[in-house]
Image (cartoon, helix red, strand yellow):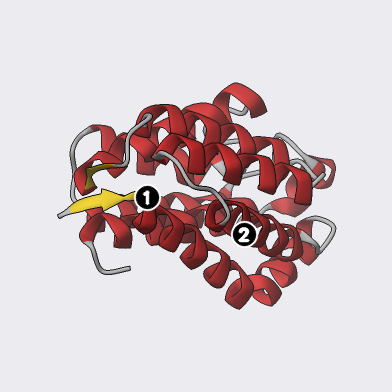
C-alpha cells in the first residue's frame, strides 16, 4: 500500500493534532529550562503546516514545501527555520511524484535530520531536538522497523535528561539544565512517532 499525497496531508493533520494535545506538557517542560513556549510554537507551527498542506494540490514535494512555508510563517522562534528546512529536505527525498512506498518514509526521517543539522549546526549530545532526530534517522538509515525507529527517538529524547545544554536558550543555565529532558527532543520524538505510524499504515 503506497503513501499518497492524501496520506501526507493526513500525516500533517496528525502532527498538528498531536502537538495540540501535548502543548501544555511541552510548555511545562520548557518552563524549567526555557521560555515555557515550546508547546505553543509547535502547536502553531504544525497547525499552519497542516493547513498549508491541505490547501495544496500537487506532488509529495509540493505538499512538503507548502508545509515548510506554513511552519516558518507561523513560528519565528528557532524551531521555525529548523523544521522548515527539515520539511524542504523531506520534500526533496519524497520527490515530485504523487505516491511512494510507505517504507520510503525512512528516507524522509533521514532527510529531516539532515535539514535540522544543516540549519541548526547542532551536534549530538548538546541537548537539542537533534538528540531525538539523530538516533531515529540512524535507525531509519539502517532499515530498522518503524517500532525500532520510534524507540530510538524516544530513548534519545530521554537521554537529554542527563545532558548539559550546549546550544540555545537552555545553554545559559549550564549545569542547572541537568535532570530535565529537552522539550525540543521530546516533541521531536512525538513527531517521529506519528511518521512511524504512517509508515506502518496505522495513522
Taking the image as shown, residue 14 lies to the left or right of residue 76, namely left
Q: Quadrant of the C terminus?
A: bottom left
Of mark 2 and mark 1, the one earlier in the sequence is 1
Whether residue 73 is situated above or below residue 197 in the rendered picture:
above
Q: Residue 193's image quarter? A: bottom left
User: Which residue is more in the foreground, 19 or 74?
Assistant: 74
- Name the residue at 37% across, 57% down: 6
Is residue 79 left or right of 61 when viewed as pictured?
Answer: right
Q: Position of residue 85 (x, y in %)?
A: 60, 32
Residue 139 visible in rendering: no
Give x and y (percent) for residue 202: 26, 69
Which of the labelled discs sits on residue 51, or is there none? 2
* Residue at (48% x, 56% y) in the render: 191
Q: Secondary structure at mark 1?
A: helix
Query: Is residue 10 visible to us here?
Result: yes
Task: List the residue tagged with mark 1.
Answer: 5
Task: Indicate whether 45 appears above or below 80.
Answer: below
Q: Is residue 68 left or right of residue 201?
A: right
In this rendering, the answer to whether 20 lies above or below 148 is: below
Q: Residue furthest left?
A: 1
Q: Residue at x 49, y 29 (%)?
A: 89
The residue sitting at 45% across, 41% down in the picture is 58
Residue 181, quarter of the rendered image: bottom right
Local crowd at mark 2 within 10 Å, few (<14), some, or many (≥20)?
some
Amino acid at each position: 500500500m503506497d503513501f499518497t499525497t492524501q496520506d501526507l496531508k493526513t500525516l500533517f493533520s496528525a502532527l498538528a493534532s498531536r502537538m495540540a494535545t501535548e502543548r501544555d506538557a511541552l510548555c511545562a517542560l520548557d518552563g524549567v529550562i526555557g521560555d515555557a513556549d515550546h508547546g505553543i510554537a509547535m502547536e502553531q507551527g504544525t497547525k499552519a503546516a497542516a493547513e498549508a498542506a491541505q490547501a495544496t494540490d500537487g506532488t509529495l514535494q509540493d505538499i512538503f514545501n507548502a508545509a515548510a512555508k506554513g511552519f516558518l510563517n507561523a513560528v519565528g522562534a528557532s524551531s521555525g527555520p529548523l523544521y522548515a528546512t527539515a520539511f524542504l529536505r523531506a520534500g526533496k527525498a519524497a520527490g515530485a511524484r504523487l505516491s511512494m512506498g510507505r517504507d520510503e518514509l525512512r528516507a524522509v526521517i533521514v532527510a529531516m535530520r539532515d535539514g535540522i543539522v544543516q540549519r541548526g549546526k547542532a551536534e549530538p549530545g548538546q541537548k537539542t531536538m537533534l538528540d531525538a532526530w539523530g538516533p531515529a534517522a540512524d535507525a531509519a538509515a539502517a532499515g530498522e522497523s518503524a517500532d525500532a525507529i520510534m524507540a530510538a527517538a524516544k530513548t534519545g529524547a530521554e537521554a537529554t535528561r542527563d545532558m548539559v545544554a550546549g546550544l540555545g536558550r537552555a545553554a545559559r543555565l549550564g549545569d542547572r539544565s541537568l535532570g530535565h529532558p529537552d522539550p525540543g527532543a521530546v516533541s521531536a520524538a512525538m513527531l517521529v512517532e506519528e511518521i512511524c505510524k504512517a509508515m506502518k499504515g496505522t495513522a
